[in-house]
C-alpha cells in the first residue's frame, strides 16, 4: 500500500507501526494519553504547523520506510 498525505493516521499505524516513532521524532505525536489522533497525515501535520513541503517529505520518507519492510 502506498502512503499518501490523505492516509488516516489509524490506517498508517496499522500498516506501518514504525510510523509512530518516525512521526514522534518529526514532532507529530500519533498517540496522546493512549488515544489515537484521528484524521489524515496531512491534517495532523498542518495542526502542528507544518507546511505542504513538510507533508510531502513525510510521505516520501514514510514510503521509503514502508518499502524496507
Image (cartoon, rainbow, N blue to C red):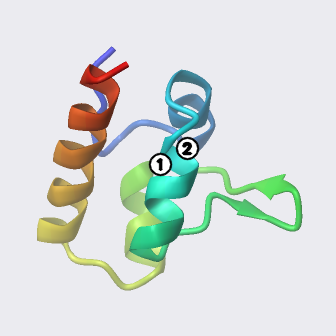
38 versus 14 height, above or below: below
Give the number of callouts: 2
Residue that badge 1 annotates: 40
- Residue most extreme to the front: 68
56 versus 5 height, above or below: below
27 versus 38 height, above or below: below
Q: Residues within 10 Å of mark 1 (few under 14, many from 20)?
A: some
In percent of width and height, residue 35 lies at: 84, 56
Residue 14: give its label: none
Tell which circle, 1 or 2, labels the residue nearer the N-terminal end.
2
**Residue drawn 60% across and 67% down?**
29
- Give the mark toward the camera: 1 or 2: 2
Quadrant of the rendered structure where residue 2 is? top left
Q: Residues within 10 Å of mark 2 (few under 14, many from 20)?
A: many
Q: Quadrant of the C terminus?
A: top left
Q: Quadrant of the N terminus?
A: top left
Residue 9: give its label: 2
Rounded to the nearest angstrom, the CA distance separating label 1 from label 2 is 6 Å
Q: Are marks 1 and 2 in contact (CB under 8 Å)?
A: yes
In percent of width and height, residue 27 lies at: 47, 76
- Of residues 11 and 39, which is closer to you in this image? 11
- Of residues 43 and 61, which is closer to you in this image? 61
**Residue drawn 35% across and 41% down?**
6
Per the image, label 1 sits on a secondary structure element best described as loop
Per the image, label 2 sits on a secondary structure element best described as helix
**Residue drawn 26% across and 55% down?**
58
**Residue drawn 24% across and 33% down?**
63
- Residue most extreme to the left: 53
Side of 45 where 19 appears, left or right? right
- Residue most extreme to the bottom: 49
Amino acid at each position: 500500500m502506498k502512503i499518501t498525505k490523505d492516509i488516516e493516521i489509524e490506517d498508517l499505524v496499522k500498516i506501518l507501526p514504525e510510523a509512530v516513532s518516525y512521526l514522534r521524532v518529526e514532532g507529530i505525536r500519533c498517540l496522546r494519553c493512549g488515544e489515537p489522533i484521528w484524521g489524515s497525515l496531512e491534517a495532523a501535520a498542518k495542526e502542528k504547523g507544518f507546511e505542504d513541503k513538510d507533508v510531502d517529505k513525510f510521505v516520501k520518507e514514510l514510503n521509503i520506510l514502508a518499502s524496507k519492510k
